[in-house]
């Protein structure tokens, strides 16, 4: 068979075009990312997804916003039908539900070979929340925790020099600072019958030697008795049984409570609205030098095990992690890593508060991890509600919760 010059050139051109098209097709990989960021305000996932998508690196990112109450069930349905995203962002206690079922990709070896993701630099709590059976299934996206805000002006007027370090001091100061005549409560917190209640009560169980699998500790019983006594005596408002953390802390922010158990999400509001001097201290312990704990909030990022592009999805994950130093300056979130320094903002109260919450994160423990966390959490906050409303004694309430949890864990 003979080839003319033009035919040969045409053939070469066509071959080059086919080769280029093939390379382009291989490079045009799309990674889907699901998160709640962007639903109410701009966040890390929507911002970093758009930035990565704009890069000319052969990987595109298709970002989808889901509502907080929908994302777990929507992701489970998508996984069951083979339509799961490549990457999803979940509240940290929900992570184990997916890891334990093999729904998340094991990234242990990928992280070991990464120059960006280093599990050793993460706080223990966030790292535990993305681990299952000794393997790594994701990375912390951002985190938060709780401490005690206190009104320095009220403390000074009452002759109290330092914030409470133990729960006994917390009660002592709350009773001393409570003033029904002026509508000032000694303290406020959230014991609401939902995840917020568990979020604030579980650290008490943990620092008293228990955990989600062992809730009926002496310390937990004593703490419930203490809180109920303060509610009964008007030192705490009855509203702590129904208010979430944001609304409960609003009582402190308005000058109507001397202390508040809450988290770093309150700092900006404090700086803007509080017309008194305030500070933050670590969550009290049961005795001086006793074990500490605190709640672990925030979200994690994981790659679904059904992804057809694990390497490309991991590159997107690496980009997100590489931007951790922007989490607080741009979005007000605390990083899950101890090697990310928060920049000084030049606002003394804010910088001091952030330092305390960074210290508190060293002791924050995850809710779980357990694939049936939502059922376990309900047993815990139901017990708290039953004890604080007087429907049961603390021992009866926690014994009932323990029986329910034992059944859940042994399934």
Image (cartoon, grey):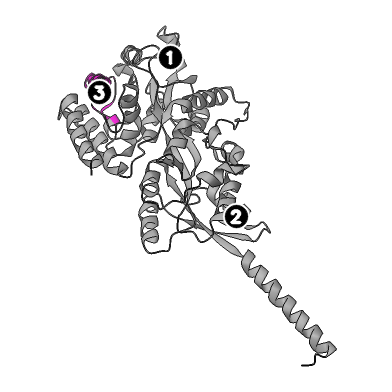
Which-is-in-front pick, marks 1 and 2? 2
User: x, y percentage for residue 281?
Assistant: 45, 20
Q: Residue furthest right?
A: 5
List x then y, in percent, for residue 366: 39, 34
| In this view, 330 is above or below 188 | below
Residue 229 magenta-drawn?
yes
Residue 344 in view here: yes
Residue holding disc 3: 217
Q: Which residue is identified by label 2?
A: 50
**Residues at marks 3 and 1, CA–CA distance in whole angstroms:** 26 Å
Given this view, does label 3 or label 1 mark the residue nearer the observer? 3
Rendered-image quadrant of the N terminus: bottom right
Q: Quadrant of residue 391?
A: top left
Which residue is under mark 1? 163
Q: Secondary structure at mark 1?
A: loop
Say which residue appears at 42% left-offset and 33% top-offset: 296
């Amino acid at each position: 068979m003979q080839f003319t010059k033009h035919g040969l050139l045409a053939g070469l051109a066509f071959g080059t075009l086919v080769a280029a098209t093939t390379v382009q097709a291989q490079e045009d990989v799309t990674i889907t990312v699901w998160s709640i960021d962007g639903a109410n305000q701009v966040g890390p996932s929507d911002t970093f997804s758009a930035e990565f998508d704009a890069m000319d690196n052969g990987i595109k990112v298709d970002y989808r916003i889901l509502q907080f109450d929908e994302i777990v069930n929507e992701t489970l349905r998508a996984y069951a039908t083979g339509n799961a995203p490549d990457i999803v962002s979940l509240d940290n206690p929900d992570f184990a539900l997916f890891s334990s079922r093999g729904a998340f990709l094991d990234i242990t070896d990928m992280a070991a070979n990464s120059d960006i993701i280093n599990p050793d630099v993460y706080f223990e709590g966030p790292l535990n929340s993305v681990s299952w059976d000794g393997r790594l299934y994701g990375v912390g996206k951002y985190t938060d925790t709780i401490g005690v805000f206190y009104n320095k002006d009220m403390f000074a007027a009452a002759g109290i020099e330092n914030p409470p370090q133990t729960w006994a001091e917390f009660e002592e100061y709350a009773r001393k600072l409570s003033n029904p005549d002026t509508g000032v409560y000694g303290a406020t917190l959230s014991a609401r019958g939902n995840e917020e209640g568990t979020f604030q009560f579980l650290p008490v169980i943990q620092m008293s030697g228990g955990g989600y699998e062992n809730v009926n500790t002496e310390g937990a019983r004593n703490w419930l008795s203490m809180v109920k006594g303060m509610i009964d005596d008007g030192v705490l408002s009855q509203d702590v049984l129904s208010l979430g953390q944001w609304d409960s802390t609003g009582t402190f922010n308005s000058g109507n409570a001397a202390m508040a158990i809450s988290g770093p999400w309150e700092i900006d509001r404090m700086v803007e609205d509080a017309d008194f001097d305030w500070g933050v201290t670590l969550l009290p312990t049961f005795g001086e030098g006793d074990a500490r704990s605190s709640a672990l909030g925030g979200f994690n990022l994981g790659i679904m095990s059904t992804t057809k592009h694990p390497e490309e999805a991991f590159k997107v994950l690496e980009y997100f992690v590489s931007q951790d130093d922007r989490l607080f300056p741009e979005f007000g979130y605390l990083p899950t890593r101890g090697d990310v320094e928060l920049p000084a903002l030049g606002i003394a109260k804010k910088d001091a508060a952030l330092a305390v919450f960074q210290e508190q994160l060293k002791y924050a423990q995850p809710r779980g991890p357990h694939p049936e966390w939502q059922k376990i959490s309900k047993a815990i906050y139901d017990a708290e509600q039953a004890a604080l409303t007087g429907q049961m004694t603390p021992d009866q309430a926690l014994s009932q919760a323990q029986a329910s949890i034992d059944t859940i864990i042994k399934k």
